[in-house]
Amino acid sequence: MMTRNEKGYEMEELLQTIAGAPRVEYITTAEGFTEAAERSLESRERVIYYLGRAEILMDAYAQAYEDGYYIPTRIERGIKVMMLVEDTPMMRRYRDSDGPQVRETRSLPPDADFRHSFMVHDDTVVFFMKTGGGAAGLSIVSPGIAETMKTVFHAIWQRGT
């Protein structure tokens, strides 16, 4: 008799054998978000697209990690962030420091109200959802899904300010 975990592993193995099936990971811990961030530092395209709410990032990542490791490492590796977030004082602070941060920040158009956020790099999309106690996420590795989300990002980017 199989345990629940064995059935889950069996299903995961089956999905991985289906041609083109996305690889999906649920993120529910700070460590999980850190692992997702670490993968973005390996971006082959040298750009990370972020759209949504800036404060969700604060819920997902410890500020000390962001400031002490992630941002300096991203800058050192020449990986640019293109960020589309709601027009808030935090967004304006981000935009004021775009140059040295190797980032370009625009505000979302007023009619683009996103309760959640997403980040795209290479073939990976990470969705960030605000929860009562912080954040939860969903990472999907799929060239087709990533390309679709990049198209959504660029369409909204053209309307951002």
Image (cartoon, rainbow, N blue to C red):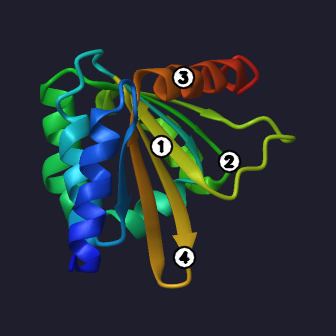
Q: Which residue is mark 2?
A: 86
The kind of secondary structure element at disc 3 is helix
C-alpha gap between disc 3 and disc 1: 21 Å
Tell me which residue sits at (71%, 51%) in the image: 114
Q: Is residue 19 left or right of residue 65?
A: right
Is the residue 16 above or below the residue 129 in the image?
Answer: above
Residue of label 3? 150
Q: Earlier in the sequence, mark 2 or mark 4?
A: 2
Quarter where residue 125 is shown: top left
The quarter of the picture where the N terminus appears is bottom left
Nearest to the observer: residue 111 or residue 140: 140
Q: Nearer the viewer, residue 64 or 40?
A: 40
Tell me the amino acid under the disc marked 3. Lys
- First in sequence: mark 1 vs mark 2: 2
User: Crowdedness of circle 1 by 10 Å Cα count: few (<14), some, many (20+)?
Assistant: some
Q: Earlier in the sequence, mark 4 or mark 1?
A: 1
Looking at marks 4 and 3 on the same chain, the residue that comes earlier in the sequence is marked by: 4
